[in-house]
Image (tube, rainbow, N blue to C red):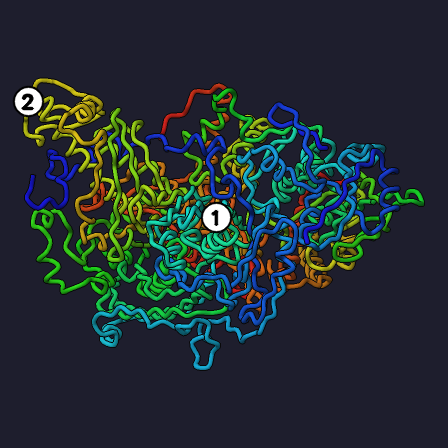
Amino acid sequence: MAQNPTIPSAPATKRGALPHPEEFTIVGKGVPVKDAVEKVTGTLKYAVDFAVQDMVYGKILRSPHAHARVVRIDTSAAEALPGVLGVVTHEDSPPGTWENAWFNYRGKILDGVARFVGDDVAAVAAVTEEIAENALDLIEVEWEPLSAVFDAEEAREPGAPQIRVEGNERPAYTVEWGDVAEGEAEADVVVECDVRFESQQMASIGRNACIAEWQGDRVTLWTSSQSPTEVRDGIHEAFQIPLSKVRVIALPVGSSFGLWWSANFMMITALLARKVRRPVKIELTNEECFSAVKRRHKEHTRGRMGCTQDGELTFAQFDNVIDNGAYGFKDDVGFFCVDMWGRAHHGSWAIHGVNTNLCTAGCMRAVGDITLGSCVERLADQLAEQIDMDPVEFRLKNQIGAGDELRMQHSRMNMKGSLEEYVAGIPPELREHWPELFHLSSGGTKDILTRGAEEFRWRERWRGWRAPYASEGPKRRAVGVGTGCHVCGVEFEGATSAVVRINPDGSAQVSAAFGRQGQGSETTLTQVAAEALGIPYELVEIDAGDTGSGPWSHGSLASNTLYRIGWAVWAASLDARRQLLEIAAREFFDGADPAELDVQGGLVHRRNGGSGVEVPVEAVMNELRSDSLGQTSSITGRPAMPMPPAVAFARHFAAHFVDVEVDVETGEIALLDYLACQDSGTIINPQVMKNQAIGGSLCGAGFALCEHLVFGEDGRILNANLLDYKLLRAADFPTSGKVLFGNSYDPVGPFGARGAGEASAIPPGPAITQAVYNAVGVWIDMPLTPERVLAALGKTG
Amino acid sequence: MRKHFKYLRPATPAEAVEMKASYGDRSRFWAGGTDLLLQWQRGEVGLDYCIDLSFTSGLDHLERVNGDLRIGATASLARLERAGDMHPLAAYLASVAKVMCTPQTRTLATVGGNLCNASPAADLAPPLLVLDGEARILGSNGERTVALAEFFTGVNTTVLDEDELLLDVRVPLEPARQTGFGRVGRTAVDIALVVAAASLSSNGDGKIGAARIAIGSVAPTPIRAREAEELLVGADVAELDGLLGEAAVRAAADTEPISDVRTTAAYRKEVSRVLVERSLTDAVSKLRVEGGA
Amino acid sequence: MTTLHVNGRAHELDVPADATLADVLRGSLGLYGVRVSCSEGECGSCTVLVDGKPVTACLMLAAQAEGAEITTIEGLAENGTLHPIQEAFIEEQGFQCGFCTPGFILGAKAFLDEHPVPTEEETALAMSGSICRCGSYPYIVQAVLSASRKLSGEPARTAS
């Protein structure tokens, strides 16, 4: 054993230290999804289905005002209603301020100020939901209305109503390289844009509930969440109690896309449960989920780009204002389009996060890249048109590839100490496998654009800019392409870990804190563990989302799970395997060197043939148990060190091709054909990945075509329901579900895999908008609703 | 305070009318309930008594009688969707039912409910109007018949008195009538942003004998574009083409749409013109093929 | 008292007259596979079969369902053996988070009962009564088509 055990050594293979796809037996295979039966039989339990003994029901009183202060609140009539156990108001709220991951929320549980229509004011617990609801009507609130501001740019003005104690605007987040003025001088063509984006709503079907139960000074929460340890952190911060006294069990989520990380209603549930000394369940209605939790930011992007006659980008300059709503606090979002187009000779990007008196805004799938990134794509297309270059070619010429320097340098910003010290501290045996620091580790769009274009018959269908390939009556058909890039988890805010245990009977279990929101991680992480352990997939199970068993992790956000939690599961599995092989070598292989042994299919054997002896894992574990020197009956594996710091340099990529038909008399857009191409390194489970790719396509296509929250003049959301917040349906999207995977292999990610969930939501907007431009000759801002299309065509005056 | 209502189950239309008369404006007829349930839950409609027509006899027929298609008030949209074989005009109505709401909602939702809820966007209203549908109504004072063209009086309001029950809608099965229909929604399933219907018939003399144009979602009630219709009557079937566009412009001029969370007034006005023209074009092409046989 | 026939058994339930079928199936009978989301008949998650026809249970009063045979997802598998439609959804992985899945499966059952050999286009239209926010529509459609082949005794198609 090495003197300084750092990363457990990967099993030796023909190709060097890291395993290669050809040798996989579980990873890369379409193994059955772990919870498939529960899903098709309706037995999977989400938070809304969950109950604990003796629980009572809570309901939240919400503000009718966008900005107002509680002068007086009288809960006596509510408390007197038969069946009511108690009420909490800001007077009961602990003084701690809690924060959600990635600055998505910052505030006290209740502080007597309402900052958006629907903001939490008070909560009631009663023996039935109906009584709790009736009690809300009996709470009397005297309000002092405050001036409200609903537009981010207005909220930046001096004298604007201050929404946050900390002020409305955070310092700008900027990325700069070179000198934009030089870049402009170099350019033969320059284009600019000024685009406003509406808010998308996660609209996750599963709604949510939270159940909180205190036992003494310890609390347990059950809720649907992508990020269990973040919920635990929030309770710890808000209530100012030790983390060890908080247990969060994150239940499966009926989809999320960022909505269900940690949310204030979870804190309120815990507060109410503590007050009434009974377990409390608060279940949110669909309207509450739509309008009182979180949404995507509204954004305003102004940009300029220039290129040479040969299509080389000389500069990219963007200024992006995002409205954080009432409690959002983001400024740090690294929009990875900056990396994607970072070959531009000069760049200047600035992001301004500003609060408004609208519902809190925060990360929704592919935050920032689906918006700002689509502006970059549009300007790229406009440049390409001016130099008469095919949009696929323009992207191939300018987009980032493996080994290129990454422009997003927030990892440097968060690093402690100097870069030199940092590099010097990395053990040499690790450095040989790692990508160069601050350079893209693997992948890119070149492969997926090239093969995707061929698969889509792009050259056949592309007739040049603004040249539909078919035109009949009022219908115009044309194709478009779009690309996107997003992160694979974010480092430097805490290391991710996992635990793997081999049981006495040779089965194994993984414990990790991640979310089950449909991304298939309970399956793919198990595949990673099973492959790394050499134990059959059917014998490996995973606990997700229980902070009592899974170590800290950010959770399943920022496309983090497979890349980072997966790496931790892999490293923990290798540690467990190492311990197993040490026992096996001693007990069954005459004291051989454990490095000469291998385990596969649950059987330990010598590498390179040998005697043909195969020892079941269960037999090895039995030795452990009956070993007079043995201390435990199970092996526990954990990563010996955090994931390599090179993690921040992984990105995942998507390139989509679309064929649209526009009816120029009604403005309707039909998607005739769609090809989603995805580069996420090794594909652990092909069908899981196809679902992610098409799922993201639908999310992005919805944003492109019809989804937007409509705000009234008083800041209320007018379409907080599925009748008027439109979601695409099966007949709105091509049924072929074609996905093409890129061929790349990450040197760090588990078995070469990288993140997957978000890049696929980015390209639909640019691809569809470009295709519509090609069909009708006009650039139209999203959402491309029928009336926006007709207005853009000049048909409605 | 959450309210509750009492539930009544009349066995016959007469009993239903009696109940309605005795409870007055504190009661509502409940057919599929797909609109009413939501309106009650949202507090838009007050309700102490729900008079459930699901089990009431004599209301769910869907049949040809003498020269009519008779559609009972509680015949579901799903049954209408499957009644196409009865007659080409039934097939027309079936094709409209098929694009309304969802398969699940169509199982419950009724023709009568769609008409009596009287949303300006009711998909069945324009087609039934262009087929000269008539509403047969039962009240405390007996039965009466009202042309659908007079049935709708405002947003969510009809000519029905407090105690009156829609029994069925009757559509004359005009042999020579050809039809057209168009609607626009934001996605595959949607309330109509605009909906239009047209019917044309010829008297066998090569000229348009009767023309009907109806548009929904462009005014407080579904409207008939009568001046546009008149433009077409007497015109030569073989030489109509420019006239259809003109009629469509005339029809759109009759609309008074609003802007709402779904779309803009300008969009509705422009697209009503387009859908009317397309509906007329559709009807004309069938007229030229099928003639007035 | 309201009598409901659910998954082959009769239940006498003391529920308010204005209780929806969805609330009663979940709250009184513990059938959590009837998933309630939008409560306005838009998303299809609460789809059940009433005399074999698909209905969003959130829009139906329990009282309206008296006398009918109600089937929820819990009633589809027989003695633990998955229905071919459920198997097809697993094989094609026509789901992600699973919340909408029971509604789609029951909607598919009603559709295939009436149209045993549908086209892809007809299937996509029929499946438009439910929303899958995760976006598995193409695989849901493939699952329904695969189910139709299973139900008509056709050999399984090999993966392309």
Question: Where on the picture, by quarter, is residue C110?
Answer: top right
Where is residue B144 shown, x and y percent of the image? 90, 45
The tally of labels here is 2
Task: Kindly tell me whether residue C122 is visible in this rendering.
Answer: no
**Image side of residue A238 versus residue B262, left or right:** left
Out of B157 and C78, give the one closest to the viewer: C78
The local secondary structure at tag 1 comes to strand
Residue B165 lies, with reference to residue A43, above or below; the image says below
Where is residue A482 shown, x and y percent of the image? 36, 54
Out of A773 and A297, give the one closest to the viewer: A297
Out of A606 and C146, give the one closest to the viewer: A606
Residue B141 lies, with reference to residue A493, above or below; the image says above
Where is residue B160 shown, x and y percent of the image? 84, 50
Kindly identify the residue that appears in the image at 74 percent across and 31 percent down: B86
Kindly identify the residue that appears in the image at 12 percent across and 18 percent down: A613
| Residue C136's disc number | none
Q: Alpha carbon of mark 2 to alpha carbon of mark 1: how far? A: 55 Å
Say which amino acid is labelled 1: Cys
**Image side of residue B69 versus residue A145, left or right:** right
Chain letter of the residue carrying label 2: A
Image quadrant in which the C terminus of chain A is located: bottom right
Residue under numbered circle 2:
A590
Image quadrant in which the N terminus of chain A is located: top left
**First in sequence: mark 2 vs mark 1:** 1
Say which amino acid is labelled 2: Asp
The local secondary structure at tag 2 comes to loop
Q: Which residue is farthest right?
A: B141
Kindly identify the residue that appears in the image at 62 percent across and 43 percent down: B99
**Image side of residue A398 versus residue A318, left or right:** left
Residue under numbered circle 1:
A210
